[in-house]
Structure formats: structure tokens, C-alpha cells
Amino acid sequence: MAARALLTRVAREIRRDIASARERDPSAQGVRAAEMLATWPGIQALLTHRVAHALHGAGVPALPRTLAFAARSLTGIEIHPAASIGAGLFIDHGSGVVIGETAQIGDNVTLYQGVTLGGTGFSTGKRHPTVEDNVTIGSGAKLLGPITIGHGAKIGANSVVVADVPENATVVGVPGHPVRVDGRRVEGPDADWIHLPDPVADAMRVLSSRVAELERQLAELTGRAPPHDSEAATVHALRPVKGRNPAGG
Ligand SMILES: CC(C)(COP(=O)(O)OP(=O)(O)OC[C@H]1O[C@@H](n2cnc3c(N)ncnc32)[C@H](O)[C@@H]1OP(=O)(O)O)[C@@H](O)C(=O)NCCC(=O)NCCS
């Protein structure tokens, strides 16, 4: 009875995986399900993982790892049997994808070839990323450690991501940093190194005006004329503030 329920669940998941590949792979339009099962490595790896994961959950020894190894040999996609994968994952092209033991993937996620959901070292416990629903991860991206990739985020090709990613953010680069959140450009670090503040000149200017005030009061008390303005200390900014902001701002 339990085995039948398991089979039904796995069959449902596989149908959804094929539908997702059809929706998100332009080259899959009009291709029959049987042809996709036979020739799409992402679908083959997922099918095998669905079975291996169910067996792993049921406590079956050795077989889940053997299945994962067979899928890896055939497709170049390595998914640990314990990894938790939601409905509608689409792995395009596939080769070089690695999904670690404690990785968790939500629904409707897309991965391209060369994506790693890996750990950062030799720590145990939860050490692989959690990827929430509707995330897209570009080819060659490495996501390392027990980080969370927020709902709807996009990870650029070849990024290396080692920190949490907010929902609906686009992250690119090494290390990965957000360039868009909710479709809007992110305020970056201030890269204007021409118009820098000059705290030393500011402090001198304050001291100079206090000395001038003291001289004025002293002149009042002694009846002597205060020094002429041209004799007062003039403070020039230490750094000339010239030119366009090189950050383009
Ligand atoms: C990250 C990605 C999803 C962004 O797409 P998008 O939402 O259309 O965003 P944009 O193209 O406007 O890019 C936003 C900024 O990030 C930069 N950028 C985009 N992708 C980048 C990447 N992989 N690495 C570094 N910078 C990248 C853009 O130049 C742009 O910079 P700007 O704001 O200074 O102009 C997309 O570029 C990407 O890498 N997709 C992966 C696709 C893939 O792996 N395909 C494999 C097919 S086989």
C-alpha cells in the first residue's frame, strides 16, 4: 500500500518535471514526453533522483546511492539522494550540476549546466544552500554554504554566491552581489573617489574660526586693532575637488 502511494507520488512528480521542461525549454516545443524522457539529461537525472530520494526516505540501503551514481555517469548531473527537491525543477543541459546532501530546492526552480549547490568546507549538518520557489540559477554559478536564495531571485552565470540572497534580487559576480532588487537598480557603494570629504581641512577650518573669534575678543579687551583678514590663517582643502564623479553619478 505504502509502495503504491510512493509510486503514485513519484509518477506525479516526474509528470510535473516533464511539463516544466516543456514550459521553460524553447527547444522542447512539440517534443513527445517519451522522447524527452529518453534524451533530456535533466529529466533523466531528476527521474532517477525522485526514485532514489523515495528509497532513501524509506531507509533502503546502498540502492539510492547506486542510482545517483548511475544517473551521474549517464548525465553528468550529481544529486545526493537526500537532497530535497520541490515540484517542477528544470535542469537545462545539465552536465556538471552538483546538488549536495542538505540542499533544499523549492518549486519551479531552473538550473543551467555547471551549477553547484555545495558546502564550503568540512562542516557537518546543514551545509548546502536552500533555494526558494521560482529561482533561476545561471550556468556555472556556485552557491556555497547553508545560505538562502530568496523567492524569485536570479543568479547570474558564473557567479559565486556565499551569502543570503533577498527575494526577487538579481545577483551577479564573484563574490555575488545584488544588482537589481524587485527590478530596480541597487544603490551600490559610493565609488566617487574625487569628491571625498576632507575631515582634516574641516577641523582646521573650525580651529581657525575659533582663533579669529578669540583675537576679536582680545582686541576688544586690549583696545588693539584685530589682525587684518589677510593675516588670518586660510585653510585650503587638502584634496582638490575637481572633475566628474568617475562612478558616473
Ligand atoms: C543574471 C541574469 C539572470 C540577469 O538578467 P536580467 O534580469 O535581464 O538583468 P540584466 O541583463 O539587466 O543585468 C543586470 C546587470 O548585471 C550585469 N550582468 C548580467 N549577467 C551577468 C553575469 N552573469 N555576470 C556579471 N554581470 C552580469 C549586466 O551587465 C547588468 O549590469 P548593469 O546594471 O551595470 O547594466 C542573466 O544575465 C544571466 O546571467 N542569466 C543566466 C543565463 C544562462 O546561464 N544561460 C545559459 C544558457 S545555456
Image (tube, rainbow, N blue to C red):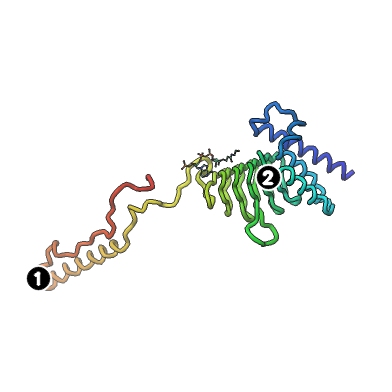
Determine which quarter of the picture holds residue 6.
top right
- Helix, strand or loop at label 1? It is loop
Q: Of marks 1 and 2, which one's residue comes earlier in the chain?
A: 2
Residue at 23 percent across and 59 percent down: it is 236
Name the quadrant of the C terminus. top left
User: Can you give x and y, in whole percent of width and height, for residue 80 in the image?
Assistant: 73, 51
Q: Which mark is residue 224?
A: 1
Depicted 229 relative to depicted 249: above or below? below
Name the quadrant of the N terminus. top right
Looking at the picture, tell me which residue is in the foreground, 80 or 85.
80
Q: Amino acid at mark 1?
A: Arg
Determine which quarter of the picture holds residue 220.
bottom left
Residue sitting at the far bottom: 222
Depicted 8 relative to depicted 233: above or below? above
C-alpha distance separating marks 1 and 2: 83 Å
Q: Amino acid at mark 2?
A: Gly
User: Can you give x and y, in whole percent of width and height, for residue 179 in the image?
Assistant: 50, 45
> Is 235 left, or right, of 181 in this rendering?
left
- Helix, strand or loop at label 2? It is loop
Residue sitting at the far right: 1
Where is mark 2, residue-wise? 106
How dense is the environment of label 2, judged by Cα within 10 Å: few (below 14), some, or many (20 and up)?
Answer: some
Residue at 85 percent across and 42 percent down: it is 5
